[in-house]
Image: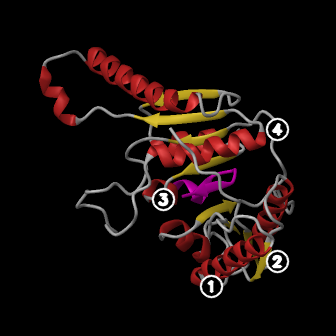
């Protein structure tokens, strides 16, 4: 396994004065203090998602030019878009605003959606031992080659890519990483003549071996990160929402699952 070291890209925050955007600013400020460039703030969390993407790209290019002029490499990473879960507009029962929804649903840069804190408070850092939780299930994102996908042009983000980003974050933050792999038993297996217990044990063992093999390839690259595996046949969205209650952040590939989780997660959600 090899890794390319790149300069960290900029952090762009969408704000509109709402509690959610205040949380987004609080999260991005904490991210900046951990080594990211100071976040640029774009006026209006309710602004169109394309405008935010364009502003982030301008900031990224400017960072590369500044590095190049200073003699440092100009290869600057894509950076982050950080927004609150919803803005000041919309109706009272709306859980996810239109800007956040489009940023999570469409292709684009890495996006972090931050929920509002309790009451009128902004987001506050979680406990020091709160893990980075990453979904490495093969079917978590837009799957390549599936004709049934509603948006087949979406780029497929594989488990290796998502895990690499999550591990890098866990190492930087000094946090454990919880890797989740969801499994299910195909309906066709019921005709094989085995007992339910045998079938479930078989598929659970396969999932555990698959996850162990995936994590094993990264243990050497990240020896200081505590890796915690979790294989489960529970509903993926329910599992991730439960884990969000004690996570520092959820890291997910773009796809229907991420769109569902970001609606109600109680911690920030990073979507690749």
Instruction: Give whichever of discs 1 and 3 has the lower sequence position.
Output: 1
Q: Which residues are magenta?
A: 260-272
Q: Nearer the viewer, residue 264 or 159?
A: 159
How far apart are the alpha carbons under marks 4 and 2? Answer: 27 Å
Position in image of residue 270 (x %, y %): 62, 55
- SS at badge 4: loop
Looking at marks 4 and 2 on the same chain, the residue that comes earlier in the sequence is marked by 2
Q: Which mark is residue 127?
A: 4
The residue drawn where x is 34% and y is 34% is: 184
Q: Residue at x 53, y 70 (%)?
A: 108
Residue of label 2: 17
Q: Secondary structure at mark 2?
A: loop
Q: Is residue 131 visible?
A: yes
Q: Is residue 253 above or below residue 47?
A: above
Badge nearest the viewer, 2 or 3: 3
Per the model, the C-alpha gap separating discs 1 and 3 is: 20 Å
Q: Quadrant of residue 219?
A: top right
Circle 1 packing at 10 Å, graded few (<14), some (14-19), many (20+), is few
CA distance for labels 1 and 2:
18 Å
N-term mark: 2 or 3: 2
Q: Which residue is mark 1?
A: 51
Query: Which residue, given by chain and number where applicable, does mark 3 sit on?
Result: 254
């Amino acid at each position: 396994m090899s890794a390319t070291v790149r300069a960290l890209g900029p952090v762009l925050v969408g704000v509109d004065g709402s509690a959610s955007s205040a949380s987004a600013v609080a999260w991005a400020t904490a991210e900046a203090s951990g080594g990211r460039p100071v976040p640029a703030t774009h006026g209006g969390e309710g602004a169109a998602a394309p405008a935010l993407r364009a502003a982030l790209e301008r900031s990224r290019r400017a960072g590369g030019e500044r590095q190049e002029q200073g003699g440092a490499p100009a290869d600057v990473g894509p950076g982050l878009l950080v927004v609150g879960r919803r803005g000041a507009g919309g109706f009272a029962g709306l859980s996810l605003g239109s800007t956040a929804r489009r940023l999570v649903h469409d292709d684009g840069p890495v996006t972090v959606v931050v929920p509002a804190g309790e009451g009128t408070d902004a987001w506050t850092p979680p406990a020091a031992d709160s893990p980075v939780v990453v979904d490495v299930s093969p079917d978590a994102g837009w799957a390549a080659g599936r004709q049934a996908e509603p948006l087949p042009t979406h780029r497929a983000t594989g488990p290796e890519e998502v895990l690499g980003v999550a591990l890098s974050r866990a190492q930087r933050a000094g946090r454990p990483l919880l890797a989740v792999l969801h499994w299910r038993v195909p309906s066709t297996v019921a005709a094989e003549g085995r007992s339910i217990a045998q079938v479930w044990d078989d598929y659970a063992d396969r999932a555990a071996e698959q996850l162990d093999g995936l994590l094993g390839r990264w243990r050497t690259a990240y020896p200081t990160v505590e890796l915690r595996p979790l294989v489960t046949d529970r509903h993926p969205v329910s599992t991730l929402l439960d884990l969000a209650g004690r996570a520092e952040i959820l890291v997910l590939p773009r796809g229907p699952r991420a769109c569902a989780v970001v609606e109600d997660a109680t911690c920030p959600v990073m979507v690749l």
